[in-house]
Amino acid sequence: MRKLSALLLVFGLVAFASNIYAQDASLDTLNQDGDTTEQAAQPTEEVAADETPAATETPSDEPEPATGFQVLKEKFIQGSWEFMLPILITLIIGLALSIERIITLNIASINTEKLLTQIDDRLKAGDIEGAMEVCRATPGPTASVLYEGLKNVKNGPDAVEKAIVSYGSVQMGLMEKGLVWISLIIALAPMLGFFGTVIGMVAAFDDIERAGDISPTIVAGGIKVALLTTVFGLIVAMIMQVLYNYIVSKIDSITNKMEEASFALIDMLIENNAFNK
């Protein structure tokens, strides 16, 4: 289920990117057609202007203000696709990894107090196998660690503690799976943006050299396109940083509950004389 959700997200973002570039291509085509139509209709408009009185002018409607998403999409289209595409790919991969981790950790989050109460009830009845069955039926790393501890009750408290510590490290590694790639994307996205900016600045200076003069139009256009890659690289990095911090905080919360449950299990085993049976 988690892999399916991540896969659907990837396909959705790829379709979104394809739609943006398709709209860009259609917009260019419409602009070219509009220019041709305007040139063809110019003589007719001049004749109509001579016949129509000046007093019949109609007020033009004010254009609707563009939304933030439309502005963002427009700026993305204006950037060079050679540098925007890698940034978009890093965003897609980063979101897929982050959402997979978030879903996994939310599933792993359980009511630890309820689990310990059920285990305590089984231990008070002397039913260690029943306590193990409760852990088996409960998803998440906390239940798995407690299960490993209960398996070693017959070997004494030292064996239980050792099993909990060893298997807790295994569960920590599983929870942190994929975080190294998310941190890589956080560092890589701004670097890709800066790389596009540097290449764009070099291209702008090449245009100035070919023109033989520092024209504001040439300089402003080249620098604008160059800086857009940095803007979107920083946006991707900020989004991924927020998701990364949320995932890390979620892992810390689960780890703290796992440690508290482990200590509580050993206390319950001692109180119920489970090591002497």
Image (cartoon, rainbow, N blue to C red):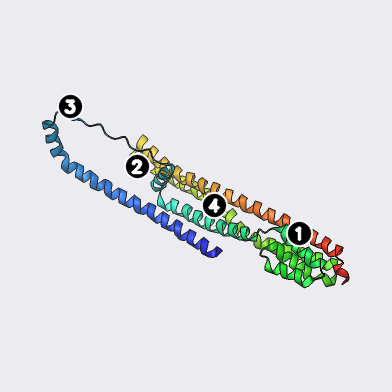
* Labelled disc at residue 93: none
Relative image position of residue 117 (x, y in whole percent): 76, 61
Res 209 → quadrant: top left
Which SS class for mark 2?
helix
Image quadrant where one finds the N terminus: bottom right
The amino acid at mark 4 is Leu
Res 124 → quadrant: bottom right
Q: Is residue 90 visible?
A: yes
State the residue position of label 1.
261
The amino acid at mark 2 is Arg
Of the two numbered discs 4 and 1 on the same chain, state the one appearing first in sequence.
Answer: 4
State the residue position of label 4.
188
Relative image position of residue 254 (x, y in whole percent): 69, 56
**Residue drawn at the location 71% of the way across and 62% of the way down:** 142
State the residue position of label 3.
55
52 horizontally vs 114: left or right:
left
